[in-house]
Image (cartoon, rainbow, N blue to C red):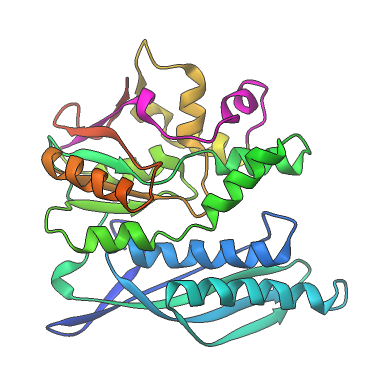
């Protein structure tokens, strides 16, 4: 817990440990079935980020039974169950309470060999940083709520939020050179990147031109359509960030954007990063990109070039 890792790990025996995590939230899309799928994808991601394989899950449900039709809840759960089936996860139970607004998510249990656990700490100078999904889901969700998101942009963002990190995690699990791993969620890329280097003798350099993002997000940022979470993330971490002269101003907001069901963020040696990236592209993860590197100075800070 002292490293703010993505999930808890408990050793059962020398060759087996369990990974445990829990995550649930309010709807971020109008369609209940789609919301169910996104919520499950998001909850499973923390197990993938630790290097593990999710096995079982329990539903966490809050629902205003007196205010909303039960068919809405049925669709949320159907979407979640379909996504669990796609991930090879077995639903073994759950708990529900009546609440003023719907909320849905999972408690997830996965497995891993104790020697194969990935942490968000351990990045080394010279490592390259891979991001597996585009950024901007928080901004797009805000635009959707305001009725100003283009249909194509909304569709693309939803499809990405429903995309399991399973393929990326399976490629990572075959390697022995991953020094650190996390997934990009509510703190934005820069917030989670800072967790990787905080209290360590390393810093980071982020390549602004290499960042994958949803087409149309720049225009939304420049017109002031950003979530409140982005502003809070920026206020909390901006003193540890240095912007280079060639970095566009809107990129900083993008890098602080709170993501829902974001991609994996990996640190590994340069040669391995190039090899892994090629395999990710071959596996259909076309947005994956090398977006930066780990440096020795200044420690505990991130420079965005």
- Residue 208 belongs to the span the image colors magenta: yes
Residue 234, image x, y percentages: 49, 33
Q: Residue furthest bottom?
A: 92
Nearest to the observer: residue 16 or residue 281: 281
Q: Is residue 174 left or right of residue 144?
A: left
**Residue at 44% across, 79% down:** 89
Relative to residue 184, is residue 91 depicted above or below?
A: below
Residue interval drawn in magenta: 202-226
Q: Residue furthest top?
A: 245
Q: Is residue 65 left or right of residue 133?
A: right
Residue 192, image x, y percentages: 37, 45
Residue 92, image x, y percentages: 50, 89
**Residue at 53% across, 68% down:** 40
Relative to residue 208, is residue 134 depicted above or below?
A: below
Residue 298, image x, y percentages: 19, 26
- Residue 252 belongs to the span the image colors magenta: no
């Amino acid at each position: 817990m002292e490293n703010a890792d993505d999930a808890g790990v408990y050793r059962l025996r020398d060759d087996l440990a369990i990974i445990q995590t829990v995550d649930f939230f309010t709807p971020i899309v109008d369609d209940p079935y789609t919301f169910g799928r996104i919520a499950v994808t998001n909850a499973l991601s923390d197990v993938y980020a630790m290097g593990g394989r999710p096995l079982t899950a329990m539903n966490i449900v809050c629902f205003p039974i007196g205010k909303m039709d039960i068919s809405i809840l049925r669709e949320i759960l159907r979407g979640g169950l379909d996504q669990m089936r796609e991930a090879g996860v077995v639903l073994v139970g759950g708990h529900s309470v009546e609440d003023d607004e719907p909320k849905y998510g999972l408690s997830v249990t996965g497995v891993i060999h104790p020697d194969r656990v990935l942490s968000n700490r351990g990045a080394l100078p010279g490592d390259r940083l891979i991001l597996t999904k585009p950024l901007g889901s928080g901004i797009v969700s805000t635009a959707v709520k305001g009725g100003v998101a283009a249909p194509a942009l909304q569709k693309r963002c939803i499809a990405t939020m429903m995309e399991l990190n399973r393929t990326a995690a399976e490629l990572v699990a075959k390697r022995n050179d991953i020094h650190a791993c996390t997934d990009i969620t509510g703190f934005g890329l820069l917030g989670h990147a800072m967790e990787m280097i905080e209290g360590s003798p390393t810093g980071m350099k982020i390549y602004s031109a290499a960042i994958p993002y949803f087409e149309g997000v720049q225009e939304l940022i420049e017109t002031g359509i950003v979530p409140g979470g982005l502003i809070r993330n920026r206020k909390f971490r901006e003193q540890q960030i240095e912007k280079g002269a060639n970095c566009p101003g809107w990129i900083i907001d993008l890098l602080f954007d709170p993501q829902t069901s974001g991609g994996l963020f990996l640190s590994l040696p340069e040669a391995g990063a190039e090899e892994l990236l090629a395999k990710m592209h071959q596996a259909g993860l076309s947005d994956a990109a090398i977006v930066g590197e780990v440096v020795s100075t200044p420690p505990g800070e991130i420079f965005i070039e």
